Image (spheres, rainbow, N blue to C red):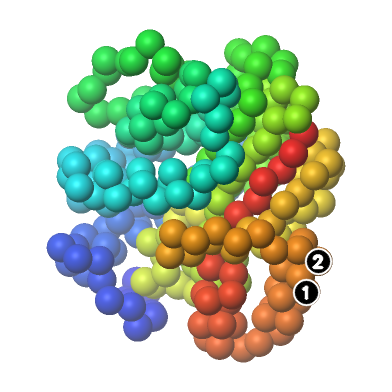
Amino acid sequence: MDTVVRRARALPPGRSLENVRNHYEVERRIAARLLAAPRAERSQIYRTMYDELFALVPDHPRLLRRDDPARTALHNRSKLDLLRGFLEPAQRVAEFAPGDCLFCLELCGHVASVTGIDISDQRGSWKDEPEKFRLLVYDGYELGLSDGCLDLVFSDQLVEHLHPEDTELHFRLVRRILAPGGVYFFRTPHALCGPHDVSRFFSDTPEGFHLKEWTYTELGPLLRSAGFTALRAYWNARGARVRLPWRLVVALEAAMGVLPARLRRHVSRGFLPNVTIAAGR
């Protein structure tokens, strides 16, 4: 495939076209390997994919944010705004895919305990863990936590990175470790206005580490099949979070899904910029 920029998008500040193209090619190569791998082989790829990515893409935005306290603070504040009303002092909370874990440290000031759960240790140079925090590195499937040990599980920009065949398995795992009445609150980019990964500069479909971008219509049945009984949909953008009727978001998706691709992306960016769900156990 020709990797010229296919869509009229401004490049990220401080990144050249050559840098962005390299990032895209690296992600596309690893993603293709992961999508083609049977489940038995995916654990090994999960363990090493981010080490490989960061080694080959030293200007990756996540690395740059980790080294910028102001950007980190802004990022953490937006995630706290997203969780507003869900956090309580006595809660046992876990974040899946915490990356640098700096948001987990922020959460420690609001709840009783915080567990970061990831496929690799991406904390960088800091390793001093507050008493309230621990990081668990797992293989993407088996997690050594007891049933019902958590009150709130959170993930932000994770579900799109899972192999599509592993998404329901992830939901079943989360439900198992949630206590009765517990909630899985997560946000993932909306498919109708994507792609949202680095392939947005070169393709009309996600080809990088966003292995599949989702809609409410697709995720609802998977969550119910995994045993979640109470699903709440939210519109979330610009620091605001508004609960929407589930039937309304499904109807909006159906209406926007028939629009021409360019118009669909433009319209859905305002109405449904992401999928934000609170799934109750």
How far across and down, in percent of the image, does residue 161 sit? Answer: 53, 47
Residue 244, image quadrant: bottom right
Q: For the point 60% across and 13% down, which residue is it?
A: 144
- Look at 27% across and 58% down and name the residue there: 22
Foreground pick, 49 / 252: 252
For residue 105, side relative to residue 245 (left or right)? left
Task: Give the distance between the C-alpha atoms of the residues marked 1 and 2, in whole angstroms.
Answer: 6 Å
Please tell me how crowded label 1 is: few (under 14), some (14-19), or many (20+) other residues with Cα within 10 Å. Answer: few
Looking at the picture, how far across and down is residue 218, in whole percent? 74, 58
Q: Quadrant of the C terminus?
A: top right
Q: Which residue: 58% across, 39% down?
A: 86
Residue 118 in view here: no
Q: Which residue is mark 2?
A: 247
Q: Determine whether 252 is above or below 169 in the image.
A: below
Give residue 138's mark: none
Name the residue type under label 1. Ala
- Please name the amino acid that badge 2 sits on: Arg
Q: Residues within 10 Å of mark 2 (few under 14, many from 20)?
A: few
Residue 29 lies, with reference to residue 96, above or below; the image says below
Q: Which mark is residue 251?
A: 1
Choose top left, top right, bottom left or bottom right for residue 43.
top right
Quadrant (top left, top right, bottom left, bottom right) of the N terminus:
bottom left
Residue 50, position in %: x, y? 37, 37
x and y, in percent, of residue 114 in the image:
48, 22
Mark 1 and 2 residues: CB-CB less than 8 Å, in contact?
A: yes
Element type where label 2 sits in the image:
helix
Q: Can residue 243 be seen here?
A: yes
